[in-house]
Amino acid sequence: MGTVGLMYVGAVLFINSLMLLGKVDEKSAGVFNLFIGAMQVITPFYLIFTSKGEPWAIFNASGIFLFGLTYLYVGISNLKNLDSSGLGWYSLWVAILALGYSYITFAKFQDIKFGIIWMMWAFLWTLFYLLLARKKDIAIFTGWVALIQAWITATIPAFLILIGQWDMIGLKITWVVTVLTILTFIVIYWITKPSDSQTTQIATKV
C-alpha cells in the first residue's frame, strides 16, 4: 500500500471511530470517507498501470482497493442514509480477503509486521460485518478497536516509513505491541459489553 495512502487510512479510521463513539456526525464523516475512498481507488489504478505487468506489484496494489471501496461505500451510505447491510456483507468479504493478504505477506514476503497488521484489519472488518450486517450491539467496542488500529496499523507505521525509521521496529517490539493490543481489545470488550438486561431490551426492539 502506498505509504501516504496508508497514513490517510489512519485518518479515516480515526474519523470513523469517533463517529461510532458518537463524537462525529455521520454525514460529516461521510464526506471525509468520500475524499479518502477516491484517493484509495485512484492510487492502486496508478500503481497497476505503472507496474509493467509485475505480478506482485499488482497484487500489492490490489489490496488498496479493499479500503478505497469500503470508504466510498461508507461515504455514500452515510450521505444517502442507506441501509448498512450491504456495507456489512462487503466488510465480511474484505475480512476474508485480508486473511489471504496476511498469509501471503507472511509466507511470500516474510514481513511479520505487515502480516500482523493485515490480521488486525481482518479482525476490524469482521467487526464491521457483525455491526452493520448482523446488527450486533458492538458499536462502542468497534469504535475503540478502530480508534486504536487507526494509530498502530496505519498512522504510526506510515509515519515511521516516511521518515525511514520503520525498520528500527524489531520483532520483539512488534510482538509486545501485538500482545498488549489484543489484551486491550479483550478488556475493552468486557467493559463495553451490554448487560443481559440491555441485550434483552435490544432484542425486543428488533
Image (tube, rainbow, N blue to C red):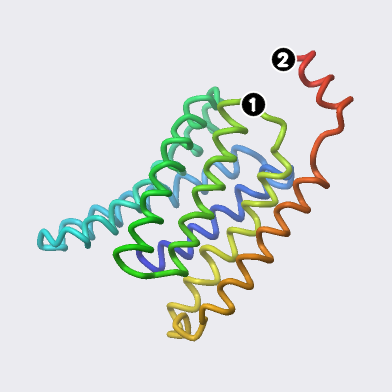
What residue is rendered at 49% in x and 62% in y?
A: 116
Label 1 residue SS: loop
First in sequence: mark 1 or mark 2?
1
When asked about the image quadrant of residue 47, the answer is bottom left
Q: Which mark is residue 24?
A: none
Q: Quadrant of the C terminus?
A: top right
Front one among 18 and 165? 165
Front one among 166 and 67? 166
Q: Identify the residue position indicated by label 2 in the image.
A: 206
Asked if residue 39 lies left or right of residue 146, the reply is left
Q: Quadrant of the N terminus?
A: bottom left
Mark 1 packing: few (<14 Cα in 10 Å), some, or many (20+)?
Answer: some
Kindly report the distance in space between the C-alpha atoms of the residues bearing marks 1 and 2.
9 Å
What residue is rendered at 49% in x and 39% in y?
A: 75
Residues tagged 1 and 2 counted as in contact (Cβ below 8 A): yes
Figure check: 22 above or below 179:
above
Q: Amino acid at mark 1?
A: Lys
What residue is rendered at 36% in x and 62% in y?
A: 105
What residue is rendered at 16% in x and 63% in y?
A: 51
In x, y percent, where is residue 25?
Answer: 67, 41
In x, y percent, where is residue 48?
Answer: 20, 56
In x, y percent, where is residue 93?
Answer: 42, 36
Q: Identify the residue position indicated by label 1 in the image.
A: 135
When asked about the image quadrant of residue 27, the answer is top right
Mark 2 packing: few (<14 Cα in 10 Å), some, or many (20+)?
Answer: few
Q: Amino acid at mark 2?
A: Val
